[in-house]
Image (spheres, rainbow, N blue to C red):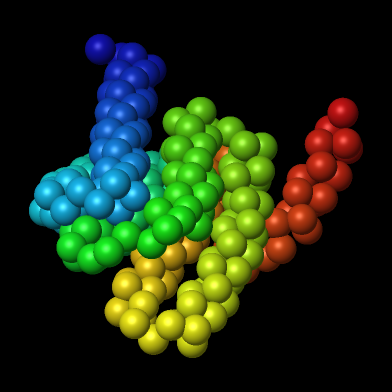
Amino acid sequence: MDTSDLSHHISRRFNEDLEALRARVMAMGGFVESQLAKAITSLLEGDSSLGQSVALDDLKVNGMEVAIDEECSRILATRSPTAGDLRVVIAIIKTITDLERIGDEGEKIGLIASRLATMERPENKYREIKHLGRIVSTMVHEALDALARLDADSAFRVAHMDRVVDEEYEAIHRQCITFMMEDPRTIRRVLDVMWVVRSLERIGDHAKNICEYVIYMVHGKDVRHTRLEDIERELRGHRGKSD
């Protein structure tokens, strides 16, 4: 085998490693997304056993994170990736941390749901949580879709949704305080609702983080501490010049 054949073989093997790694991340993302859906369902339907099962499955999420992290370390040690490939591995390491934290928040929601199932349900059947949960679930799903397709434009769009989540969270928070002041008997249940919406708000933050890693992978720009509008404007300017 001559040198060119060897380098081609090494490159092909490395690409296969990266694709296998991305597939494992997507499988972890799919599992976490499913857990989030079950956690929200357990709360809305008062299903205590479903909520508990979500909490128990968090160990599986943790195991996935450890396994993928170890594979990333192996690739960094044996393949010495450069430039764009290095960005992909770094972004994956960061992404699985956020996915694990989404799993943690799903576990919290599941545990609270199992507790709320033993209490009297409110007249609105947790309508505010259903609405916020739908927005956050969409963010997680579309962030993972942007990751799968390495679609920076979609990542920007999903990241902007975090503002809607924050606004909804603040509105529900104010509403909960009003409920507790008007009827102190609801305090225990309403406090649990506040913890759930706090978890949903954090999940939105983690979905936004994943979108920022996609933008980093595609454009090589760290956008974590920069206004998204500024980065989008800058990238549009670069595209205009290249055209």
Examine the rendering and report whether any part of residue 60 can be seen. yes
Closest to the observer: 69 or 31? 31
Identify whether 215 is placed above or below 121.
above
Q: Quadrant of residue 218?
A: top right
At which x and y percent is residue 13? 28, 24
Counting the numbered discs, the total is: 0
Identify whether 142 is placed above or below 161.
above
Q: Residue at x 66, y 37 (%)?
A: 153
At which x and y percent is residue 47? 20, 49
At which x and y percent is residue 160? 66, 52
Q: Residue at x 29, y 39 (%)?
A: 34
Pick the quarter of the image with the N terminus.
top left
**Horizontal placement of 57 versus 121: left or right?**
left
Examine the rendering and report whether any part of residue 73 can be seen. no
Q: Residue at x 42, y 58 (%)?
A: 123
Pick the quarter of the image with the C terminus.
top right
Closest to the observer: 144 or 152? 144
**Horizontal placement of 203 versus 58: left or right?**
right
At which x and y percent is residue 117? 22, 58
**Horizontal placement of 115 versus 99: left or right?**
left
Q: Residue at x 62, y 37 (%)?
A: 154
Closest to the observer: 70 or 168? 168
Identify whether 77 is placed above or below 198.
above
